[in-house]
Amino acid sequence: MRSRLIILAALITFGLGIGYIFGVKGIGFAKKGGIKWLSYNDGMETAKKEGKLVLINFVTRWCEWCKKMDEDTYSNEEVRSLIKKGFVPIMVDAQMQGEVSYKGRKMGYKELAAHYSVREVPTTWFVEPDGTLIAMMPGKIEPDYFIKTLGYVSDRAYKTNVTLAEYTGVMRP
């Protein structure tokens, strides 16, 4: 009986470890949303090659609002579809160890977050394929409003005199 409990405990631990490994790389979030998040360097390179807009999701491992946005917003079917169609999705753990390349300069993730003026997490940035910054949205964003925002950015309405509020017909909740 005792050996069965040990084996069961080992299997559960192994399963949790595998689940963690196959979550978002380095962050430990589940891939509930089905979004294939790329690393910063890979994502920016992909955006240049494909000419697609970039969505950067700045998070931290301990951030409950980041996890809530993953569960509520990024798991929304329409959100996933719009991101897949028009954006290269990048997730950055602002406190992760390691190095990235930002405009040809090597830096850590904390410094990268500072360059993007990230003062709270989650923070979502929209970026042109060439790295030109479009806009950022700090905090958790509800799915309905995020869908409208994704449309505004993918339609490149930000290049006109139309504001996001005018485009969506609502102010941010």
Image (tube, grey):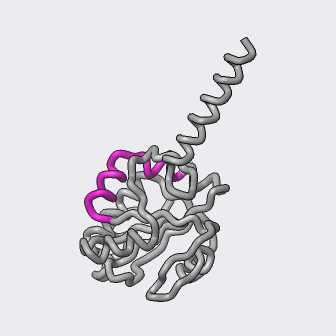
Comparing 133 with 145, the one in front is 133
Which residue shows up at 60% across the image and 54% down it?
65
Comparing 171 with 55, the one in front is 55
106 left or right of 60?
Answer: left
Q: Measured from the top left, where is residue 29 in percent x and y?
A: 54, 50
Which residue shows up at 48% across the image and 53% down it?
142
Quarter of image, res 107: bottom right
Which residue shows up at 35% across the image and 75% down it?
45
The mark tally for this picture is: 0
Considering the image in quadrants, where does the N terminus appear?
Answer: top right
Q: Measured from the top left, where is residue 58 in percent x and y?
A: 54, 66
| Residue 135 higher or lower than 85, as above or below | below
Residue 118, can we see it? no
Which residue shows up at 37% across the image and 70% down it?
54
- Residue 2 falls within the magenta-colored stretch: no
| Residue 44 higher or lower than 71, as above or below | below
Looking at this view, name the residue that lies furthest to the front.
Answer: 3
Q: Main secondary structure of the magenta part?
A: helix
131 left or right of 72?
Answer: left
Quarter of image, res 112: bottom right
101 left or right of 28?
Answer: left
Residue 123, can we see it? yes
Looking at this view, name the residue that lies furthest to the bottom.
Answer: 104
Looking at this view, name the residue that lies furthest to the right.
Answer: 2
Q: Measured from the top left, where is residue 105 in percent x and y?
A: 50, 88
- Range shown magenta: 69-87
Q: Measured from the top left, where is residue 91 in percent x and y?
A: 48, 63
| Residue 80 higher or lower than 161, as above or below | above
